[in-house]
Image (cartoon, rainbow, N blue to C red):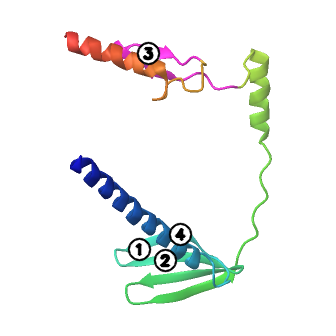
Amino acid sequence: MDTLVLALRVLLSLAVVLGLLWVLQRKLARGTAGSSGEAPLTVVSRRNISPKAAVVVVETDGKRFLLGVTEQSVNVLHTSGAPEPAPAPAAPEGAAAFARSLQEAGGDGAPAPALYPLPGGRRARRRPGPPLAGSILSPETWKQTAAVLRQVSQR
């Protein structure tokens, strides 16, 4: 009985400590997430040119900066306006022709079912089934696992 009480006390203490850590993390993360009202800073690209030096493209407030970064300093190499985002490209004509040829061939455009390994090195096609099919929560998965373990223990 004393062991059970001790285990419950340890679990309760652990829960309190983890709860405090979670609350502190939430408070600190909220305090640093854009509380100053400044424009966001985005690193567009970074290229190392030596183990201790890099060239970085940073975008903020509609401007791009090319920065030279070393252990001792950060230098602005070039400044320019940020390019306008390119409009989303329309579907290429080749894709539409491919979709038409699939429909003419009798395909529905859906990808072919993937293959998955079965015990004994066989491969079978994936069949549509219940949402849990193949997951660890599926009873069929546990039945297959038990069958494999039985085969292994008989050898």
Is residue 112 highlighted in magenta? yes
Against 70, residue 122 (above or below) is: above
Q: Amino acid at mark 1?
A: Ile
The reply to whether callout 2 and callout 3 are in contact (CB within 8 Å) is no
Question: From mark 4 to mark 1, how far is it between C-alphas?
Answer: 37 Å
Left or right: where 110 falls relative to 130: right
Q: Amino acid at mark 2?
A: Val
Which residue has dot 1 on it?
49
Q: Which numbered disc, 4 or 2, marks the residue closer to the eye?
A: 4
**Image spot of residue 98 (x, y percent):** 74, 29
Q: Which numbered disc, 4 or 1, marks the residue closer to the eye?
A: 4
Q: Residue furthest left?
A: 155
Residue drawn at point x = 27 percent, y = 11 percent: 151
Question: From mark 4 to mark 3, how far is it between C-alphas?
Answer: 48 Å
Which residue has dot 2 on it?
55
Question: From mark 4 to mark 2, how far is it between C-alphas?
Answer: 34 Å
Q: Earlier in the sequence, mark 2 or mark 3?
A: 2
- Of 88 and 133, nearer the camera is 133
Decide: few, some or many residues near mark 3? Use Cα within 10 Å; few <14, some 14-19, many ≥20.
few
Identify the image quadrant of the C terminus: top left
**Image spot of residue 133 (x, y percent):** 53, 23
Q: Which numbered disc, 4 or 3, marks the residue closer to the eye?
A: 4
Residue drawn at point x = 63 percent, y = 78 percent: 34
- Of 48 and 61, nearer the camera is 61
Against 64, residue 25 (above or below) is: above
Q: Earlier in the sequence, mark 4 or mark 1?
A: 4
Q: Which numbered disc, 3 or 1, marks the residue closer to the eye?
A: 3
Residue drawn at point x = 44 percent, y = 68 percent: 20
Question: From mark 1 to mark 2, how far is it between C-alphas?
Answer: 7 Å
